[in-house]
Amino acid sequence: MQPKLWIITGANGHFANTLIRELLNQGESVLGFVLPNDTSKALVGLNVLKVEGDITSSSDIERLIDESGTDPSEICLVHAAGIVSIDFKEKERIHEVNVGGTRNVAEICLLKGIGRFIYVSSVHAMMELPNKQSIVEVSEFNPDWVEGLYAKSKAEATREVYKMMKLGLSANLVFPSGMIGPYDFGCSHMTQMVLDYGVGRLKAYVDGGYDFADVRDVAAALIRVVKDREAGDHYILSGEYISVKEIVDVLGEVFPNYQCKLKLPLGLAKASAPLAEIYYRILHQKPLYTRYSLFTLASNSNFSHALASKELGYQPRKADESLRDMALWLIENGRIKKGS
């Protein structure tokens, strides 16, 4: 499909604004859907139209499409909006936005006859396999098969999209692993880790690691899905496994004034995580080592992007390169001062 217009929900988010930048670089027309009164600077200076609204409102989504000035059959709508949180206090809101909002957007796209609907799901929606088995694309999802509020919401939302596809929705799904890289105007978990390291606040690291993909590579792959593949295809867009030790080593090169040398035993980190979460909540800061983040660091993140590499030419860059670019971007944008 060659869309006349791309509509991106959650346009101020890390992935979404990176996707918009890549689309604009390719000469595409883009409309960004943002929350009312969102003060993010993610889209400042970009040649993109903005429409305010809420994905949980059917009338807002209908207005978004109706007022785009484009035949719905020539629109690609990328649904990237969502809440990335593991805070149990936000359980109802997470479900309302991640599940209800996704269902709502998909239903309106089906009703309006949208040319292509792309759902940005997550590898967290997929059931973990034992013994580090390779995790590949599947088409069945169940919130009971995964751990954590966010993962459960993505699994349920993904299942809703597949239901809409059976009813005729022209759609594709992508499943990124942890996304890192520049252009995070908010504060993802990994961005917080870089910020903490850069000011000397990160005092210890733990065992474990995870698979991270560069947000720019994921954006480029999604565009290839729309332009080169048929509706119905879905792809894991993972990157490379990197340990926490390797992460702090890379950050130590960028911020030589601070060196994180203390290795915290995973058992001790898990035991102290509940108290740490309370402590950081009092400080109004995002804790790095939570019960869920520690669970994730010890989980099987052997996600295979073989299908995407074969059919999309997807070749993600090395994780250390992405992490370094992420840190340098934060420095260049005044989020943190570089040590010397």
Image (cartoon, rainbow, N blue to C red):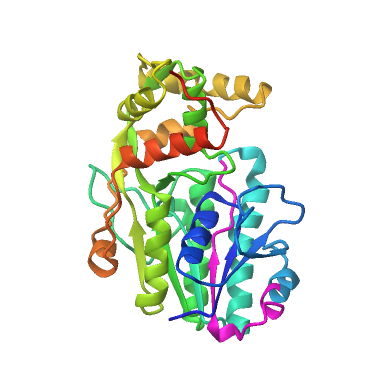
Q: Can you give x and y, in whole percent of width and height, for residue 54 in the image?
A: 71, 61
Asked if one can make out residue 290 in the rendered structure from this viewpoint, the answer is no
- State the residue lying farthest toward the top: 262
Relative side of 203 to 211, left or right: right
Identity of the residue drawn at 72% across and 47% down: 39
Q: Is residue 251 above or below residue 239?
A: above
Q: In this view, does 248 lie above or below 113?
A: above
Asked if one can make out residue 204 in the rendered structure from this viewpoint, the answer is yes
Q: Does the magenta stretch include residue 82?
A: yes
Q: State the image quarter where residue 248 is shown.
A: top left
Q: Does the magenta stretch include residue 118?
A: no
The magenta-colored residue range is 64-85
Q: Can you give x and y, in whole percent of width and height, for residue 173 in the image?
A: 43, 66
Image quarter hosting the N terminus: bottom left
Relative side of 196 to 282, left or right: left
Of the pair 211 and 246, the residue shown nearer to us: 246
Q: In this view, does 61 lie above or below 95?
A: below
Q: Can you give x and y, in whole percent of width and height, for residue 47 in the image?
A: 61, 63
Relative side of 252 to 108, left or right: left
Of the pair 104 and 36, the residue shown nearer to us: 36
Q: Can you give x and y, in whole percent of width and height, for residue 61 in the image?
A: 68, 71
Total numbered circles: 0
Identity of the residue drawn at 60% across and 50% down: 42
Image quarter hosting the C terminus: top left
Of the pair 71 and 212, the residue shown nearer to us: 71
Identity of the residue drawn at 53% across and 49% down: 14
